Image (cartoon, rainbow, N blue to C red):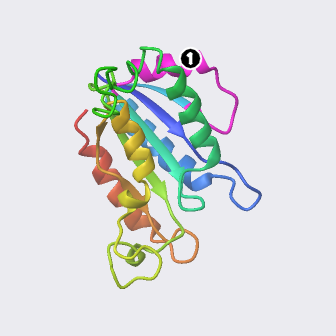
Amino acid sequence: MANILLINGHQPFPTSPGKLNAFYLERARARFASEGHATRLVRTSEAYDLETEVESQQWADLIFLQFPVNSMGAPWSLKKYLDEVYTAGMDGRLAKGDGRSRKDPSRQYGSGGLMGDTRYMLSATLNAPRAAFDDPEQHLFSGKSVDDLLAPLHINFTFFALQRLPTFAAFDVNKNPTFDDDVARFDELISALPI
């Protein structure tokens, strides 16, 4: 059985208490637990112990991140968590430096990651409609995908050598939600994960 670290990256606001992200996270946790997998949960908006979180990263076979897209990226508390935990892990626990050598410091940047046996999955909720992505005629994203929007997260995880799993996105969750369809897609994706 696998060890799964669940990260709730929602940052509460008066108009956004985080119920939808908590729903998806709990749904994933229940599915993983029903299959006999061990889980740990951290909420990035709450206090956490840095050493415990570095150890949890090492412990995990899968890191599952659930968060809303805020200001076209990860919420600030999730970004803070990633900055703190992965910077602390640069001491040889999560990465051995940045991969470059003094012999040629211009090459192999980002190849020092030590987490090659760990997978990660991003699960995001967005106010943007599905049609806003992957269409060059759309104003804001000009043909870019959700994964293009979340590229800084993917690049961070690639730096530490984590293996990427498919991204889940629930679109238009405020103005035109398709909750039942989204949950069905989510369940299908979770049940197909190679754990």
Residue under pointer 1: 52
- Relative image position of residue 121 (x, y in whole percent): 36, 43
Q: Nearer the viewer, residue 127 or 98?
A: 98
Magenta stretch bounds: 42-61
Give the quarter of the image for residue 3. Answer: top left
Question: In the displayed structure, does residue 145 sit left or right of residue 40?
Answer: left
- Relative image position of residue 31 (x, y in whole percent): 37, 39
**Identity of the residue drawn at 31% across and 21% down:** 101
Q: In what element is the residue under mark 1?
A: helix
The N terminus, quarter of image: top left
- Amino acid under label 1? Thr
Q: Is residue 183 visible?
A: no
Q: Residue furthest bottom?
A: 137
Q: Nearer the viewer, residue 33 or 123?
A: 123
| Residue 158 part of the magenta segment | no
The C terminus, quarter of image: top left
Question: In the displayed structure, does residue 168 sit left or right of residue 24?
Answer: left
